[in-house]
Amino acid sequence: IGRLVFAALNQVEWVLALIIVANLLFSKTQFITLQNTLYFIPVLMLVLETFWALPALDDRAELYIQGQNPPASTLHFYYVGMEVIKVACLTIFGIKLFNKS
């Protein structure tokens, strides 16, 4: 179940990330700004999660499903750390967008 939930969440995050990128591209403001860096950092975290962390976590889950006991790993801590970074950056990014209005 966890693999399905995290895969679905990852897909939703990509859809939302692409919507924000499109909005930034088509807005009449400069694309590369300090404020937008608060958005680009979470996108980088999303890329890392998609192509590194989630596949590695899926491999570990598969080992558990097969009845094996994989060696200890700090991968979950990295994943949680990336999620915390995304939430913090996107929160500040959103606050700055609303304060600009």
Image (spheres, rainbow, N blue to C red):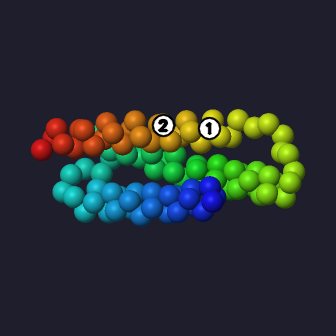
Tell me the quarter of the picture where residue 21 sits.
bottom left
Q: Position of residue 33 (x, y in %)?
A: 30, 42
Q: Which residue is mark 2?
A: 84
Q: Position of residue 16 (x, y in %)?
A: 38, 59
The residue drawn where x is 52% and y is 46% is 45
Pointers 2 and 1 in contact (CB under 8 A)?
no
Give the amino acid at mark 1. Answer: Tyr
- Callout count: 2
- Which mark identifies residue 95? none
Left or right, 89 with reference to 59: left
Q: Position of residue 44 (x, y in %)?
A: 50, 47
The quadrant of the picture occupied by the C terminus is top left
Q: Earlier in the sequence, mark 2 or mark 1?
A: 1
Q: Position of residue 48 (x, y in %)?
A: 58, 49
Give the amino acid at mark 2. Answer: Val
- Given the current orientation, which residue lies at the most extreme right position? 68
Depth check, front residue: 76 or 36 = 76
Depth check, front residue: 77 or 30 = 77
Left or right, 38 with reference to 47: left
- Given the current orientation, which residue lies at the most extreme left position? 101
Q: Determine the secondary structure under disc 2.
A: helix
The residue drawn where x is 23% and y is 38% is 96
The residue drawn where x is 54% and y is 53% is 47
Q: Which residue is mark 1?
A: 78
Q: Determine the secondary structure under disc 1.
A: helix
Disc 2 to disc 1, how far (Cα)? 10 Å
Left or right, 85 with reference to 96: right
